[in-house]
């Protein structure tokens, strides 16, 4: 859930700044790797004696997002381009799509 809210928050902030859709997606994915707040909350819960197993879970979660975050950011631009192509029906195929198995471009 936090992954989705981080992407949504980045999208919203970039939209308010007038950034286009690819930049909004990129801004959201950059926030995925930020998990310091989760560790702070887990530390407070452990210190309060609420749940001793929460700290290792939060640590594993933050480390997982630290790996997934940069990968998602790297995939943001190709994903945005793919979504943009799908949103516009009737677009001509790209040069790569127009090429056959032998790599030759065929006219329409």
Image: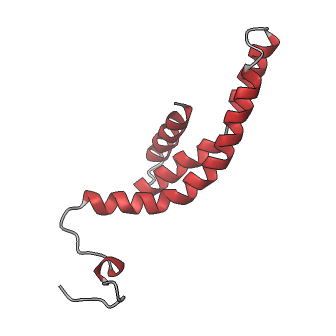
Q: Position of residue 45 (x, y in %)?
A: 74, 14
Q: Is residue 51 above or below residue 75?
A: above
Q: Is residue 30 above or below residue 41?
A: below
Q: Is residue 81 above or below residue 65?
A: below
Q: Position of residue 33 (x, y in %)?
A: 65, 44
Q: Which residue lies furthest to the top in this view?
A: 49
Q: In this orientation, does residue 20 appear?
A: no
Q: In this view, does 104 lie above or below 37?
A: below
Q: In which image quadrant can residue 44 be found?
A: top right
Q: In which image quadrant can residue 87 be found?
A: bottom left
Q: Nearer the viewer, residue 22 or 35?
A: 35
Q: In this orientation, does residue 72 appear?
A: yes
Q: Position of residue 96 (x, y in %)?
A: 36, 79
- For image coordinates 59% across by 55% down, the residue present is 71
- For image coordinates 32% across by 76% down, the residue present is 97
- For image coordinates 22% across by 69% down, the residue present is 91
Q: Nearer the viewer, residue 48 or 52?
A: 52
């Amino acid at each position: 859930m936090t992954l989705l809210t981080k992407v949504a928050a980045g999208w919203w902030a970039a939209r308010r700044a007038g950034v286009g859709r690819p930049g909004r997606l990129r801004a959201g994915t950059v926030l995925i790797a930020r998990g310091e707040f989760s560790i702070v909350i887990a530390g407070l819960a452990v210190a309060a004696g609420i749940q001793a197993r929460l700290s290792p879970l939060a640590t594993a979660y933050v480390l997982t997002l630290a790996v997934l975050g940069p990968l998602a950011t790297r995939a943001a631009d190709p994903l945005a381009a793919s979504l943009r192509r799908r949103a516009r029906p009737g677009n001509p195929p790209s040069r790569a799509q127009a090429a056959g198995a032998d790599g030759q471009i065929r006219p329409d």
